[in-house]
Every structure is written in C-alpha cells, then in structure tokens.
Amino acid sequence: MDAERLNPLASRAQSQHEALRRWLATPPGRYLLAWEQQCMDQAVPDLFGFHALQLGLPELDALRMNRMPHRWRASDESPSVISAGSRAAVVALHCESDALPFANASLDLVVLPHALELASDPHRTLREVERVLVPEGRVVILGFNPLSLWGLRQRVGRLRRRLGSRAPLFLPQAGEPIGYWRLRDWLRLLSFEVEAGRFGCFVPPLWTHRWLRRFAWMEDRGDRWWPVFGAVYLVVAVKRVRGMRLVGLARRERIKSGAAPAVVANKEGLEVE
C-alpha cells in the first residue's frame, strides 16, 4: 500500500503546500511575499519574550527581525523544506498545526502566515495556539482577504470552472480564505484582543511584474481610501486572561515602598520593633 493511502491527510497537505509554493513563484506571488516580509519586519521587532514560533510558509522569514533568544519554524512539511532560507538561530520542527509539541503557556509569540487557510481544522489550530501562548502573549496572522479584487477574481474563476472553463485561477487553489471580520470573531471567542490590523496589496489582480509596478501607486491610495479591500491582511492579537494578578517583582516593589518598621530599645537594652 502506498504512502498516499496510508496517510491521505498528509498527502493532501503536501499538495496544498506545493500549490502555494508554485503560486509564490509567480509575479503576483512574489509581490505579495515582499509586502508580507516588510510588514513582518515592522511588526515583530518590538514583541519581547523568550520563545517565538513561526507556523508554516517557510518562504517567509517572519522572525528574522525578532530578538527572542529561542525561535522555531514549524510545519507539517519535510524538515529540509522547513529549513530553507532560515537563519541559523531558527530551529526547524516537523509537526502538525493542531498538535504543537510545546507545553501549555510556554510561548511568547506565534506567527501564522496563511497557516489557518491551509489547516485541515483552522478552529482547532487557533485553539492550539491559544493553549501554548503565555498570558499576554501575541499571535500574528497573515491571510488572504476574500473581500478584495484578488478574491473577486478568484470567485469568478471558480464559477467559470464550474461551467466547464479551464481558465486558471488567480490565487492558489489550496486552502480556503478566512474573512477578516470572521477571524476577529474567532479570536474574541478565545479571549484574544486584537491590537492591530492592516491590509495590503491593493493593486489589481495582474500576472506580470510590469503591470503590477504600473499600479503600485494604488497601495498608498488604497490604505487611505478603501483600507479593508486589500488582497491580504495582517492581524496582531494578544491573549488576555481574566482575573490575573501581578506577583513576584511587582509585589516585592510594593513591600519595599511601605514604611520601615520602627526599632526602639527597652530597659534591658534589647531591640524590639
């Protein structure tokens, strides 16, 4: 019996990753990857802690500007693919997105570049991320926006295929885009608080570098005039835990700031408070 029959889910995941990798090699794919790399370089430098994890999309070096001492890059692909393009400080892991090999509340930062779209169960993946994050830990999510020109062209392409056309789809066929507001609702149910959100890639869905460069002026205009219609979004959310109390250092500081006990001498010359 071959490997595909033994593990059909793994075979399906591998084909989805291959489809996304092929698309990222196209002009619009490289355009999107450049925007995402720039956004991640701006989003992660000021997120502090000790342990950070990137889940999926090894073509994007999402943690290269982060200064946490322990960083991992995980995926359900082969370790050689995960390690491609990573720096020496990043350790490659081979694992499932809904079964991370980390203890509860052990990570300070988790980055999900298109990982929810490719996950067999995005809800379960997001719950697993909530489990491994420490209180006040951050999750950064990148995803395709179905309410965009790119998403509209993808829906038209799928409709034409149902009618018998063989026209190629614009976006990778792998995975299913998750809407921005839908994702915010999922995060809220898991006690995450959205700190920041941003959209990008406002250019029309074009196939060549030449035409993409010609419409690059739409990035600034789109960010100002129609910000929720970018082809891709970035969300930064923080894990909130109700009823938390500051202990340790904060408590000791309060004790130090209190009045010092008075010391007096009694008739026998002994010091008492």
Image (spheres, rainbow, N blue to C red):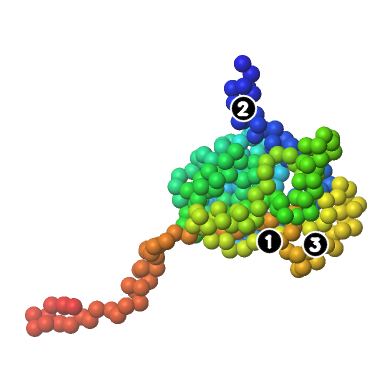
Q: Position of residue 89 (x, y in %)?
A: 61, 47
Foreground residue, 250 or 271? 250
Q: Quadrant of the N terminus?
A: top right
The amino acid beneath tag 1 is Arg
Judging by the rendered image, the residue that carries numbered circle 2 is 8
Q: Position of residue 122 (x, y in %)?
A: 58, 44
Label 2: which secondary element:
helix
Residue 166 falls in image quadrant: top right
* Marks 1 and 3, the one that precedes in the sequence: 1
Dot in front, 2 or 3: 2
Contact between marks 2 and 3 (CB within 8 A): the answer is no
Q: Position of residue 28 (x, y in %)?
A: 81, 48
Left or right: 97, with 175 as reference point: left
- Report the number of numbered marks: 3
In the rendered image, is residue 88 in sight?
no
For residue 219, the mark is 3
Left or right: 212, with 123 as reference point: right
Foreground residue, 242 or 83? 242
Measure the C-alpha gap from mark 1 to mark 2.
36 Å
Label 1: which secondary element:
strand
Foreground residue, 259 or 221? 221
Q: Residue furthest front?
A: 163
For residue 198, the mark is 1
Label 3: which secondary element:
helix
Q: Residue at x 51, y 45 (%)?
A: 128
Q: Residue at x 53, y 43 (%)?
A: 124
Q: Quadrant of the C terminus?
A: bottom left
Contact between marks 1 and 3 (CB within 8 A): the answer is no
The amino acid beneath tag 3 is Glu
65 in relation to 29, above or below: below
* Marks 2 and 3, the one that precedes in the sequence: 2
Instruction: Judge the density around disc 3: few (<14), some (14-19), many (≥20) Cα neighbours within 10 Å.
Output: some
